[in-house]
């Protein structure tokens, strides 16, 4: 059969179908309010040479306008069911008009029509050239999308894929793809012909890297939404969030990205629910899932919930569950966070549904500005004047709840559409007069095509030689040639916003942050409360105005509005740090007080920070306070008291020394070596004065003299007592007949003992000073609130060696004195020396634990106290009896008493 015969047969078949539908739907006698005759009903549905009717899969909705260059459009307005095929009627009849209309999306095709109208009027962009458009419906289904895409590439009403029969196809670019699935279906076909595809919805995830798809994204990259969610959560300090994500490739990418992103910033998920695609289309079959999810949502402590998807259908059903299961309590208020692709849309059966549950929601939206003349263009729509618009009738009927006259059906109970209904009277969830972000993207896409065509046609020899494409004109250009100019297009639209693409084909723009304010009459207002623009300077990337946000009524108090909190655990106040609870998410924690010396000066700190060495933490553990520098001074009571005691004992020692010097020729003074007595008293006097070296601000010289003077003087004093005791023992041993000890008795032996013992201690000090001498130092840690200025011993080993040597001399002295305590002598000092050395040893044995358990300047005070106590013990235990005899019993101070004591 020849091609001419085929074409003729197709034309006859098409005419028969049109004639039959005209017979069934023909009507007459209907008039508008102004008296003019209504157009036949068939002309609203099947305008001649418009949408295809006779194909096995007819396109029932289209909007076509001819021009020199055609812009294809793919919208998603009508939800067409898939009826079962029972082969008892013609397929066309089973696909009649039983469908629902997403009336909110009608603005999308009007945005394209409005843009084309403006461009054709503006002769500065495309002079002597007109733009047209072919707009088809995807019906939200892949097979309808494939069918409509092939229709865009074919000659009108002659669907022969990959062939152009007769009239040349002037299709040069396509705008479409509200949902990622729709865009992917379109790209699979348009990519073969390399037609530019502008997506105004979410961009699909393309897994086949061997065949990259070329999209021009009229919405920012998905990463903008991810970054926006993170910025919102961090700004409001919401760390406990729930997530609903569509169960597809885009949803998987979203979940994978935010999990990693949130984890880095201390945000965790209370729950993650994946919304399957079939749940949106089979909601009644998934009622059990909806009810279970609703109860989980309401029982959760989460107040911030992210809803990621391309449709609000599932969210609307989820929030409508209380009405279906008969709950009398209102659902808890949540702050819903939504992506830029989501709009509040309602279908016909949702007309009475309450939208108060999303009151206070925050969403992102493609940045848009109000277009001059756009609302007037919308108000001019009239179903009786726009015959070429195949979408308008169904939109009008479902938006206004009326029907157009049809004599073939009994519509007496239905309200008749008059055409005088006003779009501005439709609730916002069914239609908006203000331009939406998606419509704004379509408008900019049409202008991008126009400016690219303008650039292509106005280029001269330079582009012609560079690309080797010959003379460029609309009659001979190929679709792929437009890509070069689209990537470089940059212009300002009628609203003054700049439109351009980056290297990835993504429009360079930001996202507006929208606050949804709903009202009981089903109306709502979208308030811009901030902006997210990743292309802006760092200080202007994220902007939000908290005072402009209206939150859900659940977060309102009696007379003021509070910021919603979404945390697993209430914030840990300053002075506490967070400790994770075992077996729970890392956002759930206990608040533990900071340990001493550490603080937390902010809320929800993971650990406490240590104060600097010169500062200490306050009682609330939230502030570091500078330490005060302290040392044992004369001004404070403790230092003053010790100084008075030292001077008092020094005065007493000086008086005793004076008494002994004055009565130096008396027997009691001469007994037991007068020189040793003077040496002992002088050493005790110096011991009391040594105590004063420990009081006052430590200096280098003072630190060197403190331990040296104290140790040497004490060593001399103990050596004197040892020498006295040995002298007494040797003296009694020398009185025995034939004793050889007489040659050892004398002053020379006593002084030799003192000198040798003192020189050994001096050697210890020489080693100490040569290796690690004492030096002024600050003790930061011993006392919490003070910096102790003290003398550091330098070498603790040498310090305890010096003390140990003095202890050794004391033990030897007390041992010798103990054995000589019963020698018969009235003036024998062995008994007094024994008692004094017992006191001395007891004092210094208790010194070690007391010294080690003391801190700060108390250590210095303890050392001074033990110096005074041990020195006073020697003075009091040895010399008072002798002074008593010298001063008050002089009759006993004679030689006869001494001899009497021997017998």
Image: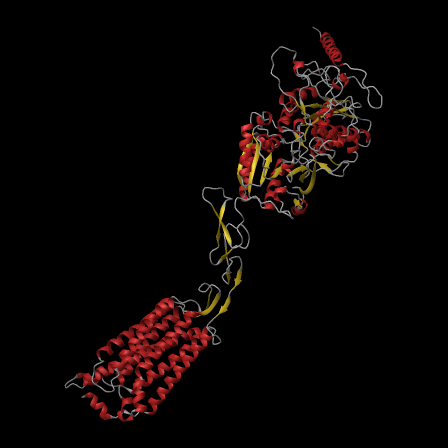
Image quarter in which the N terminus is found: top right
Pick whichever, 755 or 824, lies toward us.
Answer: 824
Q: Which residue is depicted at the point 54% across and 29% down?
A: 289
Pick whichever, 410 or 656, lies toward us.
Answer: 410
Q: Does residue 254 sit above or below 686 in this rendering? A: above
Tell me which corner region of the image, top left, top right, bottom left or bottom right, holds residue 341.
top right
Q: Is residue 675 left or right of residue 643?
A: left
Q: Is residue 653 visible?
A: yes
Seen from this angle, which residue lies furthest right?
Answer: 35
Residue 435 picture location, percent across and down = 73, 34
Q: Does residue 303 sit above or below 753 in this rendering? A: above
Q: Report the number of numbered marks.
A: 0
Q: Is residue 443 left or right of residue 295?
A: right
Q: Is residue 462 visible?
A: no
Residue 578 picture location, percent across and down = 50, 49
Seen from this angle, which residue lies furthest left?
Answer: 738
Residue 882 picture location, percent across and down = 30, 87
Residue 419 picture location, percent across and down = 78, 25
Q: Does residue 669 sit above or below 437 in this rendering? A: below
Pick whichever, 268 or 895, lies toward us.
Answer: 268
Q: Does residue 574 sit above or below 752 in this rendering? A: above
Q: How is the image coloured?
A: secondary structure
């Amino acid at each position: 059969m020849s091609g001419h015969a085929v074409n003729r047969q197709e034309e006859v078949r098409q005419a028969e179908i049109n004639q039959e539908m005209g017979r069934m739907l023909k009507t007459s006698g209907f008039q508008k309010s102004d008296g003019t005759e209504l157009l036949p009903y068939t002309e609203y549905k099947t305008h001649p040479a418009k949408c295809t009717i006779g194909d096995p899969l007819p396109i029932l909705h289209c909007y076509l306008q001819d021009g020199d260059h055609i812009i294809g459009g793919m919208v998603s307005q009508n939800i067409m069911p898939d009826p079962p095929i029972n082969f008892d009627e013609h397929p066309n009849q089973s696909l009649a008009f039983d469908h629902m209309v997403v009336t909110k999306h009608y603005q999308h095709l009007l945005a394209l029509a409005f843009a084309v109208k403006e461009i054709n009027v503006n002769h500065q962009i495309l002079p002597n050239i007109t733009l047209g458009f072919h707009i088809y419906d995807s019906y939200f289904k892949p097979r309808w999308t494939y069918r409509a895409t092939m229709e865009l590439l074919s000659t009108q009403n002659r669907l022969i894929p990959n062939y152009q029969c007769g009239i040349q196809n002037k299709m040069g670019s396509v705008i479409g793809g509200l949902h990622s699935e729709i865009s992917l279906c379109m790209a699979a076909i348009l990519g073969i012909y390399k037609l530019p595809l502008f997506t105004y919805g979410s961009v699909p995830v393309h897994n086949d890297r061997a065949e990259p798809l070329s999209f021009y994204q009229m919405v920012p990259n998905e990463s903008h939404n991810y970054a926006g969610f993170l910025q919102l959560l961090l700004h409001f300090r919401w760390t406990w969030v729930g997530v609903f994500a569509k169960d597809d490739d885009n949803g998987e990418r979203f979940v994978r990205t935010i999990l990693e992103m949130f984890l880095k910033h201390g945000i965790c998920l209370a729950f993650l629910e994946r919304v399957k695609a079939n749940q949106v289309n089979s909601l009644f079959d998934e009622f059990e899932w909806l009810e279970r999810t609703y109860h989980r949502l309401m029982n959760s402590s989460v107040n911030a919930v992210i809803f990621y998807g391309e449709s609000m259908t599932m969210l609307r059903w989820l929030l409508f569950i209380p009405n279906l299961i008969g709950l009398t309590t209102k659902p808890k208020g949540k702050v819903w966070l939504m992506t830029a692709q989501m709009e509040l849309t309602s279908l016909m059966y949702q007309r009475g549904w309450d939208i108060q549950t999303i009151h206070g929601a925050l969403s992102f939206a493609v940045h848009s500005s109000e277009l001059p003349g756009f609302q007037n263009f919308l108000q001019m729509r009239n179903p009786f004047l726009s015959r070429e618009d195949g979408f308008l009738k169904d939109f009008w009927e479902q938006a206004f709840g009326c029907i157009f006259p049809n004599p073939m059906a009994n519509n007496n109970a239905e309200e008749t559409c008059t055409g005088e209904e006003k779009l501005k009277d439709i609730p916002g969830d069914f239609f908006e007069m203000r331009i939406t972000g998606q419509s704004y993207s379509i408008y900019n896409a049409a202008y991008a095509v126009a400016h690219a065509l303008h650039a292509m046609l106005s280029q001269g020899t330079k582009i012609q030689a560079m690309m080797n494409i010959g003379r460029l004109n609309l009659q001979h250009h190929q679709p792929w040639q437009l890509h070069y100019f689209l990537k470089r297009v940059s212009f300002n639209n009628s609203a003054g916003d700049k439109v351009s693409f980056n290297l990835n084909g993504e429009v360079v723009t930001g996202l507006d942050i929208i606050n949804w304010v709903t009202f009981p009459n089903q109306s709502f207002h979208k308030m811009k409360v901030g902006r997210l623009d990743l292309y802006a300077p760092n200080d202007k990337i994220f902007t939000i105005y908290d005072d402009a946000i209206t939150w859900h009524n659940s977060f309102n108090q009696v007379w003021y509005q509070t910021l919603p909190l979404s945390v697993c655990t209430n914030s840990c106040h300053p002075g506490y740090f967070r400790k994770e609870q075992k077996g729970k998410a890392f956002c759930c924690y206990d608040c533990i007080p900071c340990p001493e010396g550490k603080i937390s000066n902010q809320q929800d700190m993971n650990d406490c920070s240590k104060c600097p060495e010169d500062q200490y933490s306050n009682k609330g553990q939230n502030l570091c306070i500078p330490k005060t520098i302290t040392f044992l001074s004369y001004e404070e009571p403790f230092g003053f008291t010790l100084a008075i005691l030292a001077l008092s004992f020094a005065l007493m020692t000086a008086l005793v020394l004076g008494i002994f010097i004055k009565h130096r020729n008396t027997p009691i003074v001469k007994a037991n070596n007068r020189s040793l007595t003077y040496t002992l008293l002088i050493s005790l006097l110096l011991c009391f004065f040594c105590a004063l070296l420990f009081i006052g601000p430590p200096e280098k010289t003072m630190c060197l003299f403190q331990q040296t003077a104290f140790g040497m003087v004490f060593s001399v004093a103990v050596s004197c007592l040892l020498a006295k005791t040995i002298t007494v023992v040797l003296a009694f041993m020398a009185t025995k007949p034939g004793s050889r000890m007489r040659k050892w008795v004398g002053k020379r032996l006593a002084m030799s003992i003192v000198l040798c013992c003192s020189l050994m201690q001096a050697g210890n000090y020489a080693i100490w000073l040569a290796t690690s001498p004492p030096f002024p130092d600050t003790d930061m840690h011993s006392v919490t609130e003070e910096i102790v200025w003290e003398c550091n011993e330098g070498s603790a080993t040498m310090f305890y060696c010096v003390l140990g040597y003095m202890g050794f001399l004391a033990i030897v002295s007390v041992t010798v004195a103990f054995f000589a305590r019963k020698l018969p002598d009235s003036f024998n000092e062995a008994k007094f020396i024994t008692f004094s050395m017992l006191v001395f040893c007891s004092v210094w044995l208790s010194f070690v634990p007391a010294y080690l358990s003391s801190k700060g300047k108390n250590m210095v005070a303890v050392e001074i106290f033990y110096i005074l106590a041990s020195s006073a013990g020697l003075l009091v235990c040895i010399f008072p009896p002798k002074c008593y005899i010298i001063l008050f019993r002089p009759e006993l101070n004679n030689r006869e008493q001494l001899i009497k004591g021997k017998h």
